[in-house]
């Protein structure tokens, strides 16, 4: 057993762990990084990158079938599903060097390709290595949660880990779960020529604002994605070459392939957390506002911390723990400005409070400023008029924004900036967006907040009339 001493041990080389390791090493710390699976973690290998690459193929196919209103003859695309998966693999391979062992070793990080587990409060063992570190960061991510549905273990099913290896196009894809994974993959597969049925136990996109979610659901249904809501899967069975999913209320759905997308479970099993005095919650490692565990030397970031499970959140966590880790300074991880985006078409994005949350928290003080894509000139020119933006405002400052529509994921970033910095709506409205851009929806939403104050205000009208009388 090789004994290693270091300043910082990072367990897991996904979005969170890599951010911490790169930052800490480049700032002078002696860093060891453990990775038992693929460098780059879920996002690069099984999550964001492959899903967005497949969505891109699907978008090209969809563009061909919907070209007529633009004056272009539509074509029924010949879809080579396996070649689309090659495109997915190429996207991963192109990004992989950034997350690679070689790059991190070049940054001075000692990379050990083994799974780690705690043996005491300060020591982690990984293969033939025993590592004692001043500080440890758990960045072990999450895995697909496979629910204990009777029959599921006896049938072949896909998860976000195995989907990318599938080369034959599903004739009829059943998806259990109507969250971001289920809905992104539902639309992508529909556009790639599959019949798709989503079986959702509650409401699809339940974490989003119902009004913005409805815009996306309508678009998906129009494209032919079948979405069954209030359909809790309760049994699965093989029916000859097919699979059948039964739901609690007696419905049944038969297809050729099955994707399980019912959420995530943090990778905390096998870490022997109790040996290090670290507690767990139902969703991951128990951390305080500083992402610190009950063992004051150990922090947890990203999906392992059991909160919002997104790459940008893992990256943000990575940045937040650098201060306490390297400078012993306090750092607080905030959540109000952390956005989410689902890359369906139209996209669905959220930051801060939804309308319902704002009304519950702030009562009558919460106002909602809205603007519809249908009034955006660029959206009209490009026939992408479905959608809207809603900005929740309290005391002149935005506390949340919900967007459904083209590039919603791009536009939500502005509201993250505003909320992160406590900007007022007047400051957002001081921005000038070039014409004609979709970004104008942000300015128009800010404008909508001021419209009743300016145009419906008698005092303003009186002042204007008075000034006009005096003007030469
Ligand atoms: C299909 C899908 C699509 C997604 N799309 C998006 C998106 O578009 N945008 C977005 O922001 N987020 C998206 N996500 C979420 C995103 O992938 C995760 O939030 C992100 O990867 C979390 O990063 P992480 O560093 O916490 O964990 P991970 O990326 O999971 O990395 C953890 C790493 O730790 C390793 N590990 C685990 N246990 C140990 C151990 N004991 N010792 C050593 N190594 C260990 C694992 O092998 C893994 O490589 C998506 C997820 C899925 C599944
Ligand atoms: N664009 C993105 O940023 C993106 C994309 C994909 C995934 N992700 C991340 O991955 C996480 C997991 O996504 P997800 O879609 O797997 O999970 P989710 O928890 O968001 O949604 C799962 C859905 O499955 C339903 N469900 C659970 N059990 C069921 C059953 N037995 N029958 C029918 N429905 C059932 C739930 O009601 C829920 O709506 C997301 O929360 C997000 O953090 C992000």
Image: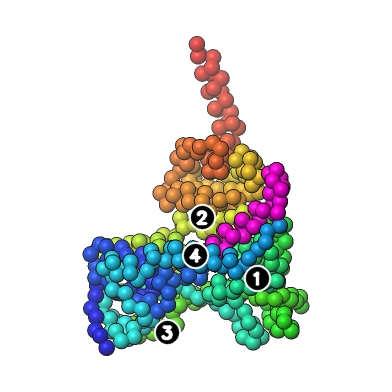
Which element type, helix, strand or loop, lies under badge 1?
A: loop
Mark sitting earlier along the chain (2/1): 1
Label of residue 169 in the image: 1
Residue 61 horizontal/vertical position (percent): 64, 57
Circle 2/circle 1 CB separation < 8 Å: no
Q: Quadrant of the N terminus?
A: bottom left
Distance from Cα at disc 3 to Cα at disc 4: 33 Å
Q: Is residue 457 above or below residue 362?
A: above
What residue sits right under mark 4 in the picture?
90
Which residue, as the protein is rendered here, is positioned at the far bottom? 1
Q: Are marks 2 and 4 in contact (CB under 8 Å)?
A: no
Choose mark 3 or mark 2, whichever is in front: 3
Q: Is mark 3 within 8 Å of ligand 1?
A: yes
Residue at screen point 54% across, 22% down: 464
First along the sequence among labels 3 and 2: 3
Residue positioned 70% across, 76% down in the render: 256
Disc 2 vs disc 4: which is toward the camera? 4
Across and down, in percent, residue 355 comes to 58, 53
Looking at the image, residue 383 sits to the left or right of residue 306; the answer is: right
Mark 3 and mark 4 residues within 8 Å of each other at the beta carbon? no
**Labels 2 and 4: the sequence-earlier one:** 4
Residue bearing mark 3: 270
Q: Nearer the viewer, residue 96 or 411?
A: 96
Asked whether 134 or 100 is in front, the reply is: 100
């Amino acid at each position: 057993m090789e004994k290693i001493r270091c300043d910082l041990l990072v367990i897991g080389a996904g979005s969170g762990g890599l951010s911490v390791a790169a930052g800490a090493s480049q700032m002078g710390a002696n860093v060891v990084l453990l990775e038992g699976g693929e460098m780059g973690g879920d996002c690069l290998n099984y999550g964001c990158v492959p899903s967005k690459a497949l969505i891109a193929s699907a978008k090209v196919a969809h563009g061909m079938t919907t070209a007529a209103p633009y004056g272009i003859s539509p074509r029924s695309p010949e879809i080579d599903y396996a070649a689309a998966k090659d495109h997915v693999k190429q996207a991963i391979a192109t990004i992989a060097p950034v997350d690679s062992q070689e790059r991190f070793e070049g940054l001075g990080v000692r990379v050990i390709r083994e799974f780690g587990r705690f043996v005491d409060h300060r020591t982690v063992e990984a293969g033939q290595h025993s590592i004692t570190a001043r500080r440890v960061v758990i960045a072990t991510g999450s895995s697909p949660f496979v629910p204990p549905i009777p029959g599921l273990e006896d049938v072949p099913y896909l998860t976000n880990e195995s989907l990318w290896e599938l080369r034959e196009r599903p004739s009829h894809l059943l998806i259990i779960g109507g969250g971001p994974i289920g809905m992104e993959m539902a639309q992508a597969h529909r556009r790639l020529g599959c019949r798709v049925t989503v079986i959702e136990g509650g409401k699809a996109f339940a974490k989003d604002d119902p009004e913005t979610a409805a815009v996306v659901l309508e678009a998906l249904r129009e494209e032919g994605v079948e979405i069954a809501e209030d359909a809790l899967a309760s049994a699965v069975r093989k029916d000859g070459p097919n699979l059948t999913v039964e739901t609690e209320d007696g419905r049944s759905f038969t297809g050729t392939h099955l994707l399980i997308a019912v959420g995530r479970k943090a990778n905390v099993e096998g870490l022997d957390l109790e040996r290090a005095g670290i507690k767990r919650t139902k969703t991951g490692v128990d951390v305080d506002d500083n992402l610190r565990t009950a063992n004051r030397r150990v922090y947890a970031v990203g999906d392992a911390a059991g909160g919002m499970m997104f790459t940008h959140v893992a990256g943000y966590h990575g940045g937040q723990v650098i201060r306490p880790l390297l400078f012993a300074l306090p750092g607080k991880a905030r959540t109000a400005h952390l956005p989410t985006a689902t890359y369906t078409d139209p996209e669905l994005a959220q930051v801060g409070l939804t309308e319902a949350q704002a009304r519950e928290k702030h009562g009558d003080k919460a106002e909602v400023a809205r603007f519809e894509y249908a009034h955006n000139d660029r959206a009209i020119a490009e026939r992408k008029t479905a959608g809207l933006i809603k900005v929740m405002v309290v005391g002149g400052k935005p506390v949340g924004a919900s967007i459904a529509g083209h590039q919603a994921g791009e536009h939500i970033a502005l509201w993250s900036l505003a909320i992160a910095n406590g900007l007022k709506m007047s400051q957002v409205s001081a921005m000038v967006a070039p014409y004609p851009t979709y970004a104008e929806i942000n300015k128009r939403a800010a404008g909508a907040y001021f419209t009743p104050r300016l145009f419906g205000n008698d005092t303003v009208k009186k002042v204007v009339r008075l000034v006009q009388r005096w003007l030469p």
